[in-house]
Amino acid sequence: MRVLLFAAALAACGGAGEEPAAHHTYDEDGIRFDYPPDWSVATSEAEDAVTVEGPRDGIFVVQRFRGAAKGLEEFSRDFLAKELTDAFADAARASAVTSEVAGARREGLRTVFSLGRGLSFALEVYRIEFPAGAVFLVSQSTADDERLNAGAFGMIRRSFRVAE
């Protein structure tokens, strides 16, 4: 079973849930966003994805689909199913959330699931349409550290832009 790496980082220059004062900017191939200076960026051309990792087992994924793209619920289910066994994916609980993403209030999907032994994870997914397709923003954190990551995740979501 392949398990996701989860974001669990206290944002640099900020306390729990605060947006970091300093930032770096990712700006490549029509995708632009700010991220905390103590997070690192990796790209995957094969999946047309950018992964931003926090200093303690963390991840935020930006995945772009050109052409017809899945809906929010289908993408979220497939994302979980790709990384978890069906038993864990089926046990996940999803609910609607709203956040400022790419300069507008957008609805997303928050999924909480447990891997047992008191270890729970939270996953939030937002879908942004653009003329050539759609981009999905996925933030992941242990449920315990979700509050600590809120500032960093908020920074990436709010500053995110995709070229039209």
Image: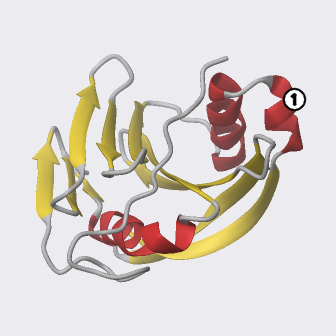
The relative height of residue 139 versus residue 34 in the rendered view (above or below) is above
Question: Residue 15 sits in which quadrant?
Answer: bottom left
User: Could one spot residue 106 in this view of the protein?
Assistant: no
Q: Is residue 117 left or right of residue 60?
A: right
Q: Is residue 58 left or right of residue 44?
A: right
Residue at image location 33% in from the left, 52% down from the top: 54
Question: Residue 76 sits in which quadrant?
Answer: top right
Query: Residue 153: percent from the left, percent from the top?
Result: 40, 65
Q: Nearer the viewer, residue 131 or 77?
A: 77
For disc 1, the marked residue is: 87
Residue at image location 13% in from the left, 74% down from the top: 22
The relative height of residue 124 versus residue 45 in the rendered view (above or below) is below
Q: Quadrant of the N terminus?
A: top right
Q: Secondary structure at mark 1?
A: helix
The relative height of residue 83 versus residue 129 in the rendered view (above or below) is above
Query: Residue 116: percent from the left, percent from the top?
Result: 81, 42
Number of residue marks: 1
Residue at image location 12% in from the left, 58% down from the top: 25
Query: Residue 163: percent from the left, percent from the top?
Result: 22, 50
Query: Residue 138: percent from the left, percent from the top?
Result: 50, 49
Q: Residues within 10 Å of mark 1 (few under 14, many from 20)?
A: few
